[in-house]
Structure formats: C-alpha cells, structure tokens
Image: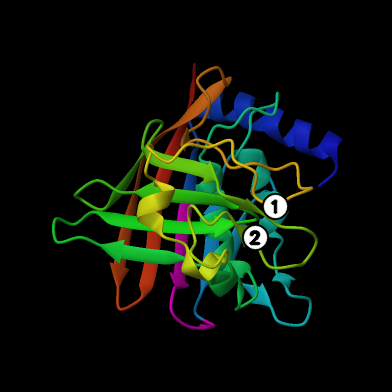
Amino acid sequence: MNRKLFILSSLMLVLVGFLFAQDLKIDYQVNVAADDPANYFTFTGPIRYMAAEKDTLDATTGASKLGSTHIFMPYLYDVKGKAVLPTGLRGLFLFAVAPKDQRIIDNLTVSKASNGVITVQYVHRGTAYKLVTDKNGKFTFPKGDFVRRTIGFIQGSNPQVIHTDFSADGTAAKVNWAKVWDANIAGGKEIKAGVATKTGEITDDNGVADAMYSWNGELQVTFDKNILKIAGGLTAVKR
C-alpha cells in the first residue's frame, strides 16, 4: 500500500470509527502443527475495502490471496504511525496466509495451561513475541499481556541468527522461551561480529499510550487439537 492510501485509510478509520462506533471484527484459524488448507483470516472494519473474507495462502504466488498482509495495516497504526494494536498480534494473524514453512521458520509455539491460559510465542526476523490470554482464553485490549524482545537478526532470506543467550545453537528452532522472557538476562549484547543489531530488553507490545485512539474489547482465543482460533470485535475509542 502506498503512503497516501495508508494515511487516507487510517484517517477514515479515525473519523468513521469514532462517529459510528464501528467495530473491527476478527475471525481467524490456523493449524500450528501442519500445513492446512482450512487456515484463514477474516476481518472487517470501518475502512472501505480494507477487509478480507477467509483470506488464505495463494500457493502460486506464496502470498495471501486477498492481500491481508498489507490491507490490515491501517488497523495497526493511527495516522501518525503510532501502534494501536500489538505488532505481535498482526504477525500472528499472518501465519494463516503465509507459506506453510513460515510457522517452522518462526518457531510458532502455542500452549494451553490447566487454568485455561493460552500462550502464543514465535520469533520473526529476530524479534520474539509473546501473547497471553486471561484464564477465560481472552486477549484483552487496550492493555493485555503482550510483549516482545529482540533476540536475533536476519539478513535477506537467510535463516534467523539468534543470540546464544536464548538458543543453544543460535537457531530459531532451539529458542528457549523461558530465557527469552527472563528479565535477568540483560539486553544490549552483540549477536554477531560486524552486525549492528544487538539483543534488547523485554518491551511492552500493546499500542502506545500517546496514539490518537485505542482498540478496546476482547478477542476469544481457543486452542484444541493444534487448531488456534481467534474471534471477536474491537471498538475504536478516542484517547
């Protein structure tokens, strides 16, 4: 999407969403353990044409059939480019429309605790993300349990290089999630000689506090037999 269209779409979201209280509605399904043609990502919102109905992977092009990769972006930022949703959530949605090996490359990991809490973790282009539900299996907004951390880097299409603080062999496949989210392991470390990117601290991944608006509400998450589902609606609320 070009910058002018992005800005115009975001402005429409702010104006129309606030005036008519239209929701951003989400319906999503992904198999976290196998290639699955039943994967899909559906979303609708107050921006005309910025919607997709059961978008999925186009095996021929390797991209999403309906363009979710870019047309969802206006719901992620306000007109000043400030995040209003977790970037990790947007990345999670794209697993449903990405090539089948993406979940392996990014080590997409989902677990459900006995108390009902569902935890989603993955590392994409050197940044690790964690998204955690409440005991009712819900992601809550505008302030949920969403964090991220720089733990590696990627150059071009090469595999991710992960700092050995977080991966015994430096690969995404061997990431130790407990170490990634251990605040006692300091950031600021060189990952590879000659590469400027360094490890980071654990960072909140909710939308920023000074954004023009926030998305408020809940998304229901379920995880059963390797199928992760997310559904619900969010409302744009002016700050």
Name the mark on residue 192: 1
Q: Nearer the viewer, mark 2 or mark 1?
A: 1
Q: Which region shows up in magenta?
A: 26-37
- Is residue 113 within the magenta segment? no
Dot 2 amino acid type: Val
Marks 2 and 1 close (CB-CB < 8 Å): yes
Above or below: residue 232 compared with residue 171: above
Q: Residues within 10 Å of mark 2 (few under 14, many from 20)?
A: many
Dot 1 amino acid type: Lys
Q: Quadrant of residue 228?
A: bottom left
Q: Quadrant of residue 45?
A: top right
Q: Name the residue that disc number 2 marks.
A: 161
From the viewer's perspective, tell me whether residue 238 is left or right of residue 117: right
Residue 212 rendering spot, x and y as whole percentages: 58, 19
Disc 2, SS: strand
Above or below: residue 15 compared with residue 4: above
The one of 41 and 89 positioned closer to us in this rendering: 89
Disc 1, SS: loop
Q: Residue at x 77, y 38 (%)?
A: 6
Residue 154 rendering spot, x and y as whole percentages: 71, 57
Query: Does residue 100 appear in this view?
Result: yes
Q: Residue furthest left?
A: 115
Q: Quadrant of residue 11?
A: top right
The one of 188 and 121 positioned closer to us in this rendering: 188
Residue 78 rendering spot, x and y as whole percentages: 64, 28
Q: Residue at x 56, y 49 (%)?
A: 151
Above or below: residue 184 compared with residue 51: above
Name the mark on residue 86: none
